[in-house]
Amino acid sequence: MTDITTPLPRPSLRLPVRGEPFERASLDAITGLDRVSSATACAKLHGLGVTRSFVEGPRPLQPGQRIVGSAITLQFMPQREDLASGLGQEYVERHTALWAVMETVQPGDVLVIQAYGSQFSGCIGDILARYFQRKGGVGIVVDGRIRDSGRIRDLGLPVWSTGVTPHYASQSELFPWAYDVPVAVGGALCLPGDLVVADDDGPVIIPQAMAGEVVDSARDHEEWEVFSRHRLDEGARLSDYYPLTPDTREEYESWRSARAFAR
């Protein structure tokens, strides 16, 4: 019979794992997306050939909030007692990727966390959320749960998660394993430096290299939707103005030119 008090042999793997250096999204890219909704970003990416950009599952802790920022990433992995577990209580976490990624935060960052939709791991709590916010982080997207939700809500820090739990991060089945690595969140891939747009419709991941195309396409889309709403409110037919027909497109171009001249 095995003696469970005997220390398990430990593989020669050093934690936390850190990925390769990366470049954050530019301020111009972030600013360009400032007025683009997640719905529009998702639709435009689909038209450009990226069909899985929506992070399914996480919902806003506080409705009405919105973020745009450059992604930094944190990856949880299943616990295995010979490598990493929460048996040492939360004090062990200060030596994990969860603490390490916090020291990399820069203004404009969005922390994107892979947690497999876990119902029992509180990936972020009040103290870490405060520290993240103080360093200039603009929001957090968690494919899993958070703890201290009331205090985080009081902070005003925008957070998207699948729910709440009283557990700390490594109390259950997961462990903060790696940072600055690709992560899978809600069925979408997020690379460090990708852009994140999140609002009441949920988070969307925009590949950094495609941000300019999305901005150009989305700007026109958002503008003609303003025009279409205006015409529909005046009693126009839906089929004429959503989407625009060739004739109403010409009408829109004239309307847009007149607005630009009036400015």
Image (tube, rainbow, N blue to C red):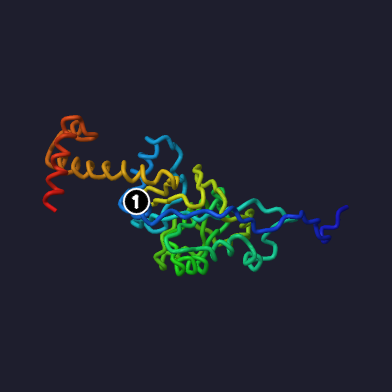
Graded by Cα atoms within 10 Å as few (under 14), some (14 to 19) or many (20 or more), the crowding at tag 1 reads many
Q: Is mark 1 on a helix, strand or loop?
A: loop
Instruction: From this view, report whether residue 217 is shown above or below residue 163.
Output: above
Q: How many marks?
A: 1
Q: Mark 1 points at which residue?
A: 33
At 42% from the left and 58% from the top, the residue drawn is 61
In front here: 240 or 102? 102
Residue 196 lies, in percent from the top left, at 42, 51
Residue 16: % across, % down: 65, 59
Q: In this view, does 235 lie above or below 70?
A: above
* Residue occupying the point 58% across, 61% down: 98
* Left or right of 49, for residue 168: right
| Amino acid under disc 1 | Leu
Which of the 4 image quarters holds residue 249?
top left
In this rendered view, identify the residue nearer to me: 166 or 197: 197
When the figure is inspected, residue 19 is found, relative to residue 227, above or below; the finding is below
**Residue at coordinates 20% horizontally, 30% vertically from top-left?**
245
Name the outermost residue toward the right: 1
- Please provide percent x and percent y for residue 127: 52, 69
Residue 90 percent coordinates (x, y): 63, 66
Q: Which of 153 and 176 is in front in this view?
A: 176
